[in-house]
């Protein structure tokens, strides 16, 4: 099957293959699967795959020599024999496949590989252009129309018109590893860099370009610290509404609520972050937040993301199963995320243990209050047919005290929304197609990184 072959090729290490070779194998697998190519010359094969002729000319001999491609000559009455190519199913089939990819995401990646070479012009996100309602886009399947301008896939400024092979590999891998609303977890920078054949320094530059251009909503680096029960992996949130994925993914609806609220649930993480910063700068270790004083900002973004995903999961339980929040379950989930420090004999040790226990209770309370508010705001808008991981409450508001609450919903939602906005808030109470939302609101609501 094409899907299985593409999964296996994605997991191939770029240590043994160049990025160009790996891209050729991916596009070939997406186009021909386990079958043979036609009786094609190099120029014809490049045209059939949508790749540059130079890339195909250089990659095919190397892949044949490495036994990734099998050749079958076809003799004619006159002239040189032609060749048919096929993937070496024995060699590629031996690559183990885990649970890194979801079926729908792999199918989206296969569709994405239909156009592996495109122009630069349209990578940048442009708010306010091509305004179309989410309902119309979902109903029409958001198909790419004939004559649309090619989509840009270039992440570095320069003279080149096209994105290089490792850049296309990065976009394909992120798309294939994402869940229905675009969250990619479990891929460290080291693993991602090895998969596309670049250094970690080069990868960070590429990720920044993708984030600056709106292809990635946020990149939250991983962290290992004693306050967490395990090492937290990096998280990448892909904007599957970006034009670069047009015709490939079903767009997500965006629900935004803004309020100048002062409730405890909204201010908790903001205040906690400020107190941790104060403890770090002043040396005052009396507050429970002092055990988090050495953590960087992205550690608090990881905490916020965990709480938001927990709220999103319980929102789907509330909608589908119509049962109230299970508070002990929320607390147990948080206890599995944060480490409970052991009490020692020293005052410092006892204070740290008390702080870790207090953090569990505070986060559980924060999650419960957020869930109550999200159900109140969006419960009648989101259909009861949504599944786990099809709703995401976006992180990015930790320092704003949840002034904005933003939900991505994969399933079709009812429009207009009954959500009421506070005076002076973003003033359209309906489900929005994302390109209708002004860029300053996208930044404030967590739809894009500053």
Image (spheres, grey):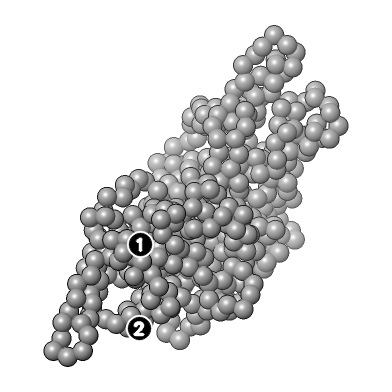
Residue identified by numbered label 1: 107
Q: Distance between the residues labelled 1 and 2?
A: 27 Å
Quadrant in the rendering for residue 353: top right
Q: What element carries label 2?
A: helix
Tell me the number on the disc at residue 429: none
User: What residue is drawn where x is 60% and y is 46%?
Assistant: 221
Residue at the (34%, 70%) spot, across then down: 61
Q: Nearest the camera: 283 or 360?
A: 283
Quadrant including the C terminus: bottom right
> Camera-side residue: 22 or 331?
22
- Confirm whether residue 414 shows in the render: no
Find residue 113 and report its horizontal and vertical position in percent. Answer: 40, 69
Q: Is 82 situated above or below 272? A: below
306, 258: nearer the viewer: 306
Give x and y (percent) for residue 357: 63, 22
Q: Is mark 1 on a helix, strand or loop?
A: helix
Residue drawn at x 53%, y 58% is 198
Q: In this view, does 119 lie above or below 349?
A: below
Q: How crowded is mark 2: few (under 14 residues within 10 Å), some or many (20 or more)?
A: some
């Amino acid at each position: 099957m094409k899907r299985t072959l593409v999964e296996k090729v994605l997991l191939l290490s770029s240590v043994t293959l160049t990025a160009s070779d790996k891209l050729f194998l991916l596009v070939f697998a997406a186009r021909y699967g386990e079958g043979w190519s036609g009786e094609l010359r190099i120029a014809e094969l490049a045209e059939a795959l949508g790749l540059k002729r130079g890339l195909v000319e250089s990659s095919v001999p190397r892949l044949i020599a490495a036994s990734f491609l099998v050749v079958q000559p076809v003799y004619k009455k006159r002239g040189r024999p032609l060749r048919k190519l096929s993937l070496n199913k024995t060699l590629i089939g031996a690559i183990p496949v885990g649970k890194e990819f979801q079926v729908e995401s792999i199918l989206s990646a296969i569709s994405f590989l239909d156009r592996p070479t495109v122009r630069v012009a349209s990578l940048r996100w442009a708010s306010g252009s091509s305004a179309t309602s989410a309902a119309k886009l979902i109903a029409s399947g958001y198909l790419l129309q004939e004559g649309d301008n090619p989509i840009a896939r270039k992440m570095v400024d320069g003279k080149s018109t096209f994105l290089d092979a490792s850049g296309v590999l990065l976009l394909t891998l992120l798309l294939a590893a994402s869940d229905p609303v675009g969250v990619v977890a479990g891929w460290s920078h080291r693993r991602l860099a090895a998969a596309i054949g670049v250094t970690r320094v080069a990868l960070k530059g590429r990720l920044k370009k993708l984030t600056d251009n709106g292809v990635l909503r946020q990149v939250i680096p991983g962290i290992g610290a004693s306050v967490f029960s395990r090492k937290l992996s990096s998280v990448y949130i892909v904007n599957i509404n970006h034009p670069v994925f047009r015709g490939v993914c079903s767009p997500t609806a965006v629900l935004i609520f803004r309020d100048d609220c002062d409730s405890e649930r909204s201010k908790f993480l903001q205040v906690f972050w400020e107190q941790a910063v104060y403890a770090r700068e002043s040396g005052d270790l009396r507050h429970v937040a002092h055990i988090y004083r050495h953590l960087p900002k992205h550690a608090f973004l990881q905490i916020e993301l965990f709480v938001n995903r927990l709220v999103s999961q319980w929102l789907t339980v509330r909608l589908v199963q119509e049962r109230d929040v299970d508070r002990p379950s929320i607390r147990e989930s948080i206890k599995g995320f944060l480490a409970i420090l052991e009490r020692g004999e020293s005052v410092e040790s006892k204070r740290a243990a008390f702080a870790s226990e207090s953090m569990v209770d505070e986060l559980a309370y924060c999650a419960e209050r957020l869930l109550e508010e999200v159900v109140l705001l969006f419960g009648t808008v989101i259909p009861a047919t949504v599944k786990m991981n099809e709703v995401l409450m976006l992180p990015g508001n930790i320092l704003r005290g949840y002034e904005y609450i933003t939900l991505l919903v994969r399933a079709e939602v009812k429009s207009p929304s009954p959500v009421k906005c506070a005076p002076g808030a973003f003033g359209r109470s309906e489900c929005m197609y994302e390109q209708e939302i002004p860029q300053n609101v996208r930044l404030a609501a967590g739809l894009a990184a500053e």
